[in-house]
Image (cartoon, helix red, strand yellow):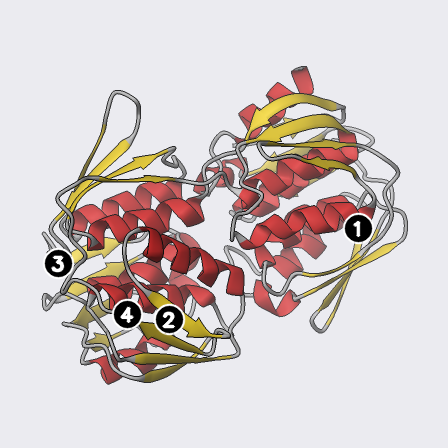
Amino acid sequence: MIVRVKPGKVSGNIYAPASKSSMQRACAAALLRTGTTVIKNPGISNDDKAALDVIQKLGATYTFDEQNELVIFSTGVNPVGEEMNCGESGLGIRMFTPIAALSKQAITIHGTGSLLTRPMDFFDDIFPQLGVSIQSNAGKLPLHIQGPLVPADIEVDGSLSSQFLTGLLMAYAAAGAEGVTIKVKDLKSKPYIDLTLKVLNNFGWQVTHDDYTNFYFGPNLSPYTSNRTPYTYTVEGDWSGAAFLLVAGAIAGDIVVEGLDVFSTQADKAILQALSDAGAGLSVQEKQIEIRNLPLKAFHFNATDCPDLFPPLVALAACCSGTTAIEGVSRLAHKESDRGLTLQQEFAKLGIEINLQGDLMLIKGGSIKAGTVHSRHDHRIAMACAVAALRANGEVLIEEAQAVNKSYPNFFEHLIKLTLD
């Protein structure tokens, strides 16, 4: 699919999409909790749909009620088949694999797209310590596992992705790992672990830590938290998707974004700091965020703990005077694309110079040119180019723009709404 974005102003009110980080964690917790869970504001992205398919394969059932709320019923992890597919969700594959290992049934775990090339060596190293047999394709998918997972004291490397730890925390909590410790070294993206712990706590599991280095598990109902009363969980608005809307307002207009929790533990809430540092007109209120275009200046930002912000930050930096520096490039290699190189190459087509120096990305602000770019099948690249196009000197064509379906299917619809208001 090719989408054409013309330069122009944005204005009006828009509601943030549902957070797939929050949605997928809630689906996992609802699977692990016996009984009924009602999820309000459920997400509709491809990753969300993949999560629903996985919990169904692992034994849960779900329906949507007349209010479009998601109703999940589970008796714990009881696979109904021998295979599951996490789609192209990095969080999904890393979170649900330890959860699936709670079962003694042999399961083959598949993925699609970029997941097929992402490293999964982590499980090869950790699972044998937990009584789980595993066979991988030289550290990549598909994975063939057989549990049951037995919690034990382990040490894990948190430098590649916090998503592996999220899966272990959920599996350990559900298995009743009281008295067991997970030691973590060099943990990245700590706010995402905060979100995991928040969801676990909301669903009734006690998990604490010592400055993110040792994680401890409190007493829980074993093997799964159970309650006869349905539990209700509301999915947060998505700071990751909303970051593109906020940047659009900062570079091309005056908009109001609703549905975001300013007290959220989502890592990408840090977009507010970057926008402030760049000089955007920003008014943060309890239930909405107003943002408007003012003269923007280059900024310095550390995105190590929020690497998904790189694409919207590049769109923002392209419209700032001076050279912006963003730290954390090493976190970008194993995304839907190698995002550091992809951003450099695709924004070069729009006349924006990006230099990569080790862990540092330098973006030289300037005039954005009309041109044709390619999403590289990466949802955040497609959205970043579309937002930058609002300030181009002509039309920008985005090839394979349907990549946005992974996280924000309504993105172009919302962008059109803002340009028409």
Q: Secondary structure at mark 2?
A: loop
Q: Amino acid at mark 4?
A: Gly
Report which residue position mark 2 lands on: 120
Please report contact status of discs 2 and 4: CB closer than 8 Å, yes or no: no
Q: Which mark is residue 277?
A: 1
What separation in Å lies between label 2 and label 4 (alpha carbons)? 29 Å
Q: Nearer the viewer, mark 4 or mark 3?
A: 4
- The alpha-carbon separation of the residues under discs 1 and 4 comes to 41 Å
Relative depth, front residue between 220 and 212: 220
The tag earlier along the polypeptide, 1 or 2, is 2
Which badge, 2 or 3, comes first in the chain's sequence?
A: 3
**Marks 2 and 3, Cα distance to the nearest angstrom?**
20 Å
Percent position (x, y) of residue 70?
27, 34
User: Which of 394/42 is in front?
Assistant: 42
Task: Name the amino acid, label 2.
Answer: Met
Q: Secondary structure at mark 3?
A: loop
Residue 256: where, in percent of width, then height?
66, 27
Question: Does residue 286 lie above or below 184 as drawn?
Answer: above
Residue at 45% over, 62% down: 193
Q: CA distance from mark 1 to mark 2?
A: 37 Å
92 with respect to 383 (left or right): left
User: What is the crowding at mark 3: few (fewer than 14 residues within 10 Å), some, or many (at least 20)?
Assistant: few
Q: Label 2 neighbourhood size at 10 Å, few (<14), some (14-19), many (20+)?
A: many
First-in-chain label (1 vs 4): 4
Q: Please, what is the three-letter code of the amino acid marked with disc 3? A: Glu
Q: Which residue is mark 4?
A: 218
- Tag 1: Cα neighbours inside 10 Å, few (<14), some, or many (≥20)? some
Residue located beneath label 3 in the image:
82
